[in-house]
Image (cartoon, helix red, strand yellow):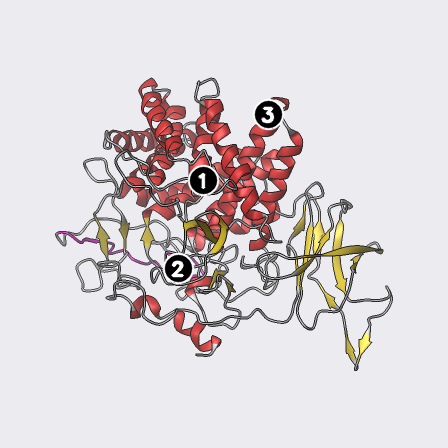
Amino acid sequence: MKRRTFLGSLALLPAALAVQEGPPEADPVEQFTTPALPTIALSHLGFRPEVSKTLIVRLTPATPKVESCLLEDVVPPFKTQIELHRSESDFGPVLVGDLSALNRPGIYQVMLGQERYDQPQIINGVQQWEHSVPFFVRDDVWRRTLPKAVGYYRYQRCGVEVPGVHPACHLDDARRRDNGEHVDLVGGWHDAGDVRKWMDVTMLNGIALLKLRLEVAPREGVSGETLLEEVRFGNRYFLKMQDRDGRVWHDTAGGVNGDNSDNHWTDNIIGTADDRYVDTSKPEVVSAIFVALEALAAQSYAASDSAYSAQCLAAAQKAWRAWPERGSRTLELAWWIMAGCELWRATHDSSVIAQMVRAVEKLMGNQVQSYVGGQRTIRGFWLEDSAAGKAMPNPYVDLVFSAMPPIALLEFTSTFPEHALGSRCVDSARMYVEDYVLPMTEHNAYRIMPVGLYRGAPTAETYRPVAGEFTYRYFLPVRKQFWWQGGNCHLAQHALLLARLAQFETSGGRDSARSQDHINLAYRQLEWIMGANPFSACLMTGEGVRNPYPHSRFVGLIPGGIMNGIAGNPSDEPVLDLEYGIDWRTCEYWSPHVAFYIWANAVLKRLHA
């Protein structure tokens, strides 16, 4: 099957596999080769003056044999040579150039293959050099993207007309799956490049916007009033999804039995055949995220709308009480800690602390804090669930919430800085970063974090060896299940974690050098999204160049939307649709990517305020 045909067919897979259980029989991807050009990869936005700056050149048969490249500023004229050093790492051999000494504000471009400053090398009548994208060195290169990212949510509004995007929609949402009764669930945000409304991931939108308001002083385009107005819009729907018992329903329009049947426009008339369904199951993690959002909202609106603040707080407290017995799984524990921190800030209820302490102790009990599996290379990662009586569980792998355990522990310490567990929580997060994240990111020149750690090869595809029984993949396995995709949210979330840990390293006169290392690595995760990847493609619409066309079948291009991103084939090699196949696995917009991008940038900006 040709690559164009394959990528074009991916968009049809959700419907084609709606009634199929397990992975398809045929290999999802048989082979992939990155394009010959461009070979220069760096952040299309540019760099803040004080952070590290890396240039990567992929080596191909057409790459000139060079030991340096020319760095040029457009205005005023400025030129210098940058040495390139060969690096043998995952994703193949590359040349790496260090631009970190460049802290002079300007707009720059790299030229590869020139023997002289004033003319290119000519071989057989062909110019043997390549330009990078122009890029800035300036303090606000990342902050300038935030108005677009925030504006993404307005395009995704459901239940109202969005001028220039779509008319009022889904005014008939929704009917219950269990008994068919109609429930008013109009509103909220469409989740991705579709028109469905999942709770867990779209609630991240509200959390990210409110965190941005807290971390960054109001600026044009991201004013506090704008953020509060957008969150209030989305939150109308979230509040409606809380059942009488305090627990929270799973989704609206997710289909029936996991299919894609509800992913459509409707006639907006209640009781007709096209009415969409609400899944009234109540996962624990959805309630935990709900508490975190509503308690944060209660704090955020307290000064401007005390009645609305009280409504949000009452909903949070009701959901908190609805789960007196909480599980031991890493994912739920992390979000209950996040929820408890926000609830305590809103209420200063001492009873919350005792429940939080139990969750923190359980979560730290799920962390591998010694060397296991016949190796002494990595530790500090989490297991799915290490409850007593269970066999040794698998390492924790979750594309959407991959770094939430250490983020939650840092949140506990920042909320209760004097608590006896506080220093242990920071040590736990630091171990995850220094004994797991740092060793893993050193396997590749781009310094991105692999998506997961595994034992051996659980599926018939490539798993890269680490040490002992452990292996890793940069991208989700493609033969494990039909659902796999790019993980820009995973990278942005690790940028958030590294930025949060850097805050702790610099507070109280601690290790500023270590803090800067974490900040530099945080930006490397974000730079992959913004073009420092093997395709030299920027994955946010409206920024950079070589943007793939997004899988956004209902509204088209959305400025500030971030696509799923680069995924992998069975050989764990990168896959990205640059041929307009509208591939959902790599090019679909999705809420978690934008949410964690905003949140990470908010914290990074605060570090340099």
Q: For residue 396, say whether it is visible.
A: yes
Q: Residue furthest front?
A: 374
Mark 2 burial class by Cα count in 10 Å: few <14, some 14-19, many 20+:
some
What are the residue bounds of the magenta stretch?
A: 161-178
The three-letter code of the residue at mark 2 reads Trp
As measured in the structure, the alpha-carbon distance from the residue carrying label 3 to the one carrying label 1 is 25 Å
Number of numbered discs overlaid on the protein picture: 3
- Residue for badge 2: 484
Residue at the spot 56% in from the left edge and 48% down from the top edge: 441
Label 3 vs 1, first from the N-terminus:
1
Left or right: residue 57 versus residue 364 is right
- Residue for badge 1: 381
Label 2 vs 1, first from the N-terminus:
1
- Find out whether residue 264 is within the magenta segment: no
Residue at the spot 34% in from the left edge and 20% down from the top edge: 349
The three-letter code of the residue at mark 3 reads Ser
Mark 1 burial class by Cα count in 10 Å: few <14, some 14-19, many 20+:
many
As measured in the structure, the alpha-carbon distance from the residue carrying label 2 to the one carrying label 1 is 22 Å
Q: Secondary structure at mark 1?
A: loop
604 in relation to 112, above or below: above
As measured in the structure, the alpha-carbon distance from the residue carrying label 3 to the one carrying label 2 is 39 Å
Mark 2 and mark 3 in contact (Cβ < 8 Å)?
no
- Find out whether residue 167 is within the magenta segment: yes
Give the numbered dot on residue 507.
3
